[in-house]
Structures are given as C-alpha cells and as structure tokens.
Image: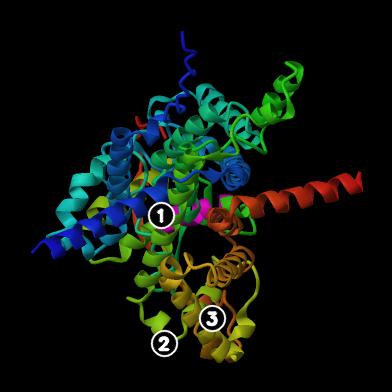
C-alpha cells in the first residue's frame, strides 16, 4: 500500500521540480531584449500608420460608432479604451503623438520598465476602440507587449543599459559592476516561457482550425489564398499549373502548425520547425501582403532562440557595422 | 577569550525564490495559461460544450480587458474563397454623387492601412447570412449603419447607399482558361443599407 503512495508522491515531487525548473530558472536576457527592439519598432510602425486615418478610425465620427460596437460580439463590457472619452481632434492627436513617443522610447529601451507597461496598455486601447479593423498583427502585438513588460526587456540593447554602463564608469566602478542589470534573470525566463507557450497555442489552434476546412484536406487551400486578389501582393496565378506544389504547400502548412507545439521543444527538431516558420511567414509577408503580420510572428518565434545565440548574432552584426565604419 | 569566527550568512533569497510567492506566481501562471487556451477552444461550436462554455464565461473578466479573446483561426477553416468589399454612393447637398469601392490597394497605402480597411469591409460578410441569424442583428446591420454614418460625415452627404461587393476567387480551371483575378463576372453587388438624413440632422 505504501509503495504506490510513495510512487505517486515521488511523481508529484518530480512534477513540481520540473515546473519550477521550467519557469523559475534564470535565463539570459538577450533574447527578450532583442524581441523588445523588434516588437518596439513594430508597435511604433503599426501605430504610426494609424496616423493616416486617425479621425476616421478613432474620432467621434469614426467608421465604428460606440452604439454599433456595443451590439457586436467583437466587443466586451470590460474592453476599455481611453478613446471613448476623446471627442476633440486636437486631444485625439495629442494622445496619439504621446502614444508614438511611448512606442519609440520602448523601442530604444529608455525607462523600459515604465514604457513597456505603457506600450502594452496603449496597444490594447487602440485595439479595443476599433476591433473590426484589427487582425493577426494586433493579436501578436498584444501578446509580445504583454509578456515583455513582465521581464527585464531593457537589460541590454537599450538606452537604459547604455546609461547604466555610463553611470558605472563615472562612479569608477570595476567593469564587472558595469554589467548592471543582471545578464540572467528569472523574469526574463518567465516572459520567454509565456511567449513560447502562447506561440504554441496560436499555431496549434491555427492548425486544428484548418482541419475543419475541406480545402486544407483536398490540397487546394494554398491556391485559394494565392487567388485572393484582395490579399495577394505577388501574382501567383502561375500556381494553377502546379497543382502538386499547391497541395504540398497546403499539407505542409497544416502539418507544421499542428506539430509545432510538440516538436519545437526538441533540440533536433527546433531548427526545422523554426526554419518552416521563417519560410511560411516570409511567404505570407511577400505574397499575401501582410508584411507586418508575417514579421511580427517571426519576432515571437525568436523566443525559442537561446540568449547566447542572440548575443553572438548581435555581436557579429555589430562587428560588421564597426568594420564598415 | 576565544576569538569567534564571524558567521557567514547566505544571501537572502529573492522574493520569487521563497515558497509562497513562488506558489502564488505558479497559480497565476496556471490560470493565465487556462485563459489563453479557453478562447480558441470556445470558437463556434466549441462554446456550446458544457465544459468549455461556462469555463470561458468564468475567465471573460480576464481575457476581455487583456485582449486575449481570440480564436487564432488564421485562414481557417478555409482561406477566403470570397472577399467582401463595399461600394458606396454618397449624395452631396448640391446633387453630385461620390462613389467608390473600398478598399483598393492601388489607392490605399501603405499595405497595413489598406489591410485595416479590408478588415472593416470583411466584417460585413455577416450580411450574407440568413436574416434570422444572430450576427445579422448584432454585427451586419449595426456595422453597415455605422459605416454609412461615417461616410455621410466624411463627404457631408445627405444620402448614403452602401452596397456589399462579393469578389469570388477564380478556381484553378478558370485561371487556366485565361480568366483574370479581377474578371467582372467574379463580382456581385447588392444594396445592404441606405442612410437618408432628415433636413434637421447633421451628417
């Protein structure tokens, strides 16, 4: 009787150890910081583009009125946005410019702890005002900005880090003290783990959602994506003469999405899974006119690249830049 | 008097290394992951499940404000076989009529801004559902009325007629026979909403 109980207890202890190892082991901060730079730029660009139709989308006479949205299933009673209280164009522009400043500071990594929280709140405020004009890009923007604010995303590749180093030099501290803030952090690990798991959830449901559609089974889905004039940004009608290629791309996409959450955790499979992500998302960016969405999804995939690898790549890029100068 | 060796104390554990904060953080992480998984699980018809439906209701207060309420069905269950656009006619007070089909990627730039408009018009595909379908009442009609109202304001028009334009993608055989993606036979247009302002109403 004791042996099975002991086995269950051992299993529970091992599970708890595994959980703690997964979430609370410190991770190098470089990956999270690189995601901040890329996501910060994407947030800045995404919201800069809103400037072209600020009053059309966020003003009191916008495409979507409060009354229409109140009836819609896209809305939620707690889907807050400060745009509901703005009815003067001057104030609207002032708030928008402030938002752009926040995103730009977040991208640069200045006062990252504060700007990361403001960037997330601002991103959500825009989305909640006009959910009918949003798509996958806004979802990945929300996800990345939400998790970035949980970790030390300004610990490197940021003005914060540059200022900290300068302060240390001024105070005559030894070079090791210049490494403030720490290069490894539990917060960075929690944030990266959450991004990784959320990416898995997204791909898995994108994959099993496709399994409900006939075109993903009969191998024609990629054709319908390519033949959608409103989406396509490259003429892909030549694919009409390559049905086997269309079917291969269709089936590969579904297989990759469905298996992503299982295979991406294995060291040997990861390059293949992430390589597919690069191919699929660059394909979406180049052929289906969603450059922003395609690249933002790749920023999320970066969470699976180790901090050491990111640091090495950044160092090499910096070296190339120095040599050019 | 014996010399006592100073006692070396281990550095105090960070807050997340203490058992209780770690347990609380673990609880939140587990809850958050549940809240991430439930919205895509409850996409129609998943919400009808006696387990998923109530669970989704229970986390709505959390996923709503954080904008986590998404199904992630990118191009699923099928890619768009039909695209939904709008064509409108706005009658100005001087009698001239402004008309346009939206969105047009040759006129709206950059691509992201065009895509914002495409998402707006795509929502009107609900107008193609049977009249008794809930989305007709909740989405198609209020959105069409709201879009018409916006166009009246933009052009200072007294009358706005809003048409839903369906653009079917051609099949492989049709393209092989030489059909272009913008062949006129692929488009279908029907009036879905008319806004007529009374003389006292402001556009």
Taking depth in this image into account, of B90 and A110 the one nearest to the observer is: A110
Up-down relation of residue B121 to residue B27 (above or below)? below
CA–CA distance between discs 2 and 3? 12 Å
The extreme front residue here reads B1
The region drawn magenta spans B113-122
Residue closer to the observer: B82 or A318: A318
Label 3, residues with CA under 10 Å away: few <14, some 14-19, many ≥20: some
**Quadrant in the picture for the C terminus of chain A:** top right
Q: Is residue B114 magenta?
A: yes
- Residue B163 place in picture, x, y as percent: 41, 59
Name the secondary structure under disc 3: helix
Q: Do the CB atoms of the residues marked 1 and 2 lie less than 8 Å apart?
A: no
Image coords of residue A272 (percent x, y): 57, 72
The tally of labels here is 3
Image disc number at residue A314: none
The residue under the point 28% across, 34% down is B20
At mark 2, the secondary structure is: loop
Q: Which mark is residue A218?
A: 2
Distance from Cα at disc 1 to Cα at disc 2 = 36 Å
Q: Is residue B151 visible?
A: no
| Label 3 sits on residue | A249
Spatial CA distance of label 1 from label 3 is 38 Å
Q: Earlier in the sequence, mark 2 or mark 3?
A: 2
Task: Name the residue beneath numbered marker 1.
Answer: B162
């Amino acid at each position: 009787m004791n042996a099975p109980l002991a086995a269950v207890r051992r299993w529970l202890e091992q599970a708890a150890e595994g959980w703690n190892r997964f979430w609370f082991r410190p991770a190098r901060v470089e990956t999270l910081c690189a995601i901040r730079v890329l996501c910060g730029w994407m947030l800045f660009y995404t919201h800069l583009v809103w400037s072209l139709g600020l009053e059309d989308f966020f003003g009191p006479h916008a495409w979507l009125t409060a009354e229409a949205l109140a009836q819609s299933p896209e809305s939620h009673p707690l889907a807050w946005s400060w745009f509901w209280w703005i009815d003067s164009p001057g104030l609207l522009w002032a708030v928008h410019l402030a938002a752009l400043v926040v995103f730009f500071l977040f991208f640069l990594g200045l006062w990252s702890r504060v700007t990361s929280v403001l960037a997330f709140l601002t991103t959500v405020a825009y989305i909640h005002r006009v959910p009918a004009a949003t798509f996958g890009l806004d979802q990945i923007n929300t996800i990345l900005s939400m998790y970035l604010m949980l970790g030390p995303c300004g610990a490197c590749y940021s003005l914060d880090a540059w200022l900290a180093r300068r302060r240390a030099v001024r105070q005559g501290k030894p070079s090791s003290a210049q490494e403030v803030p720490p290069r490894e952090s539990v917060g960075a690990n929690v944030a990266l783990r959450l991004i990784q798991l959320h990416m898995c959830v997204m791909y898995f449901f994108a994959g099993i959602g496709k399994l409900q559609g006939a075109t993903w089974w009969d191998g024609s889905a990629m054709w319908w994506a390519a033949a959608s004039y409103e989406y396509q940004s490259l003429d892909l009608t030549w694919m009409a003469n390559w049905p086997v290629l269309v079917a291969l791309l269709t089936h590969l996409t579904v297989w990759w999405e469905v298996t992503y959450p299982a295979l991406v955790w294995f060291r040997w499979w990861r390059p293949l899974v992430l390589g597919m992500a690069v191919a699929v998302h660059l394909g979406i960016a180049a052929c289906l006119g969603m450059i922003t969405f395609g690249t933002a999804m790749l920023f999320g995939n970066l969470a699976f690249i180790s901090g050491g690898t990111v640091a090495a790549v950044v160092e090499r890029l910096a070296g190339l830049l120095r040599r050019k100068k | 008097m014996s010399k006592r060796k100073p006692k070396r104390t281990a550095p105090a554990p960070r807050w997340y290394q203490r058992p209780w904060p770690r347990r609380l953080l673990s609880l939140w992480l587990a809850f958050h992951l549940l809240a991430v998984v439930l919205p895509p699980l409850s996409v129609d018809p998943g919400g009808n499940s006696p387990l998923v439906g109530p669970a989704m209701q229970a986390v709505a207060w959390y996923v709503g404000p954080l904008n986590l309420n998404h199904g992630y069905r990118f191009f699923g269950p099928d890619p768009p076989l039909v695209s939904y656009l709008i064509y409108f006619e706005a009658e100005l007070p001087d009698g001239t009529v402004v008309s346009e089909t939206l969105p047009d990627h040759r006129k709206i730039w950059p691509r992201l801004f065009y895509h914002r408009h495409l998402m707006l018009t795509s929502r009107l595909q609900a107008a193609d559902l049977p009249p008794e379908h809930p989305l007709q009442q909740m989405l198609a009609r209020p959105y069409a009325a709201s879009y018409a109202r916006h166009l009246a304001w933009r052009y200072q028009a007294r009358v706005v007629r809003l048409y839903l334009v369906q653009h079917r993608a051609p099949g492989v055989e049709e393209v092989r026979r030489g059909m272009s993606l913008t062949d006129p036979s692929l488009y279908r247009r029907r009036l879905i909403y008319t806004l007529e302002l009374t003389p006292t109403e402001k556009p």
